[in-house]
Image (cartoon, grey):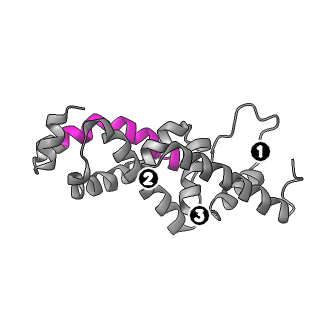
C-alpha cells in the first residue's frame, strides 16, 4: 500500500480511502470468513470494519502497518460479536493437523467454551494462533504487542484452559 494513498485518506479523501479498503478487501474477507464460516456474516464484518476504519483512519500512521491495523479492527469486531451473541459460529474450527484423533462436535464445543472463559487478550491470541493460523510475529503485529507478551498470553491461556478442563474432568491431564 502506498503511503501517499494513506496520507490522502487520513485527510478525508474518500476516493483514497476506497482504494485503501479495496487493496485489503480479499485479506479481510479471508480473516472474516475464518471467524464465521459463512459469506453473509463475513461481509457484514467487513462492512463494519470499513466503517470503523473510516471513522478512525487518522490513527493509522504508516502504510507498513495498514494490514495489521485493519485486521485488528476486524478481529476485535468478530470476537466481540461472537462473545456478545454468546454463541460460537465457527462450526469447523480446525485443529493441529498432527492431532492423532479428530475431535468430535462435543470436544470442539467444549474447547470453544473454555476459550471464551479466558481473558479477552488470551482468547484473541489462542484464536488467532490455533484457529486462524497466524504466527506469533503476525499476532504481535495485529494486536500491537511485543512477541514476548503474545507468547506469555498464549502460555498462560493454554495452561489455564488445561487446568480448567482437568478440574471439570474434561481431560485426563495429558
* Residue wearing tag 1: 103
Q: Nearer the viewer, residue 24 or 45?
A: 24
Q: Which residue is mark 2?
A: 41
Residue drawn at (44%, 38%), measured in percent from left and top?
Answer: 30
In the image, the segment drawn in magenta is: 18-41
Q: Overall secondary structure of the magenta stretch?
A: helix
Q: Which image quadrant for residue 131?
A: top right
Q: Position of residue 54 (x, y in %)?
A: 22, 54
Q: Is residue 110 something one can see in this rendering?
A: no
Disc 1, SS:
loop
Residue at position x 30%, y 35% in the image: 64
**Which quadrant of the figure contains the N terminus?**
top left
Label 3: element kind: loop
Disc with the residue nearer the chain's start (3 vs 2):
2
Distance (Cα) linking label 3 and label 2: 24 Å
What residue is pinned by disc 3?
119
Circle on res. 70: none
Q: Is residue 83 left or right of residue 173?
A: left
Lower position in the chain sequence, tag 2 or tag 1:
2
Callout 2: 10 Å neighbours few (<14), some, many (20+)? some
Mark 1 crowdedness (10 Å alpha carbons): few <14, some 14-19, many ≥20: few
Residue 61: where, in percent of width, then height?
Answer: 24, 45
Instruction: Please state if 14 lies on the left or on the right of 80 as rendered.
Output: left
Amino acid at each position: 500500500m502506498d503511503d501517499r494513498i494513506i496520507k490522502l485518506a487520513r485527510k478525508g479523501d474518500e476516493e483514497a480511502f476506497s482504494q485503501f479498503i479495496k487493496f485489503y478487501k480479499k485479506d479481510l474477507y479471508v480473516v472474516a470468513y475464518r471467524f464465521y464460516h459463512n459469506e453473509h456474516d463475513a461481509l457484514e464484518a467487513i462492512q463494519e470494519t470499513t466503517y470503523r476504519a473510516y471513522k478512525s483512519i487518522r490513527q493509522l500512521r504508516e502504510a507498513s502497518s495498514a494490514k495489521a491495523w485493519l485486521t485488528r479492527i476486524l478481529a476485535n469486531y468478530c470476537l466481540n460479536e461472537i462473545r456478545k451473541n454468546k454463541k460460537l459460529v465457527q462450526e469447523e474450527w480446525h485443529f493441529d493437523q498432527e492431532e492423532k484423533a479428530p475431535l468430535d462436535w462435543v470436544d470442539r464445543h467444549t474447547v470453544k467454551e473454555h476459550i471464551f472463559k479466558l481473558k479477552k487478550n488470551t482468547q484473541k491470541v489462542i484464536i488467532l494462533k490455533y484457529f486462524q493460523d497466524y504466527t506469533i510475529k503476525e499476532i504481535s503485529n495485529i494486536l500491537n504487542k511485543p512477541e514476548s507478551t503474545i507468547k506469555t498470553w498464549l502460555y498462560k491461556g493454554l495452561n489455564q484452559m488445561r487446568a480448567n478442563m482437568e478440574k471439570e474432568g474434561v481431560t485426563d491431564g495429558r
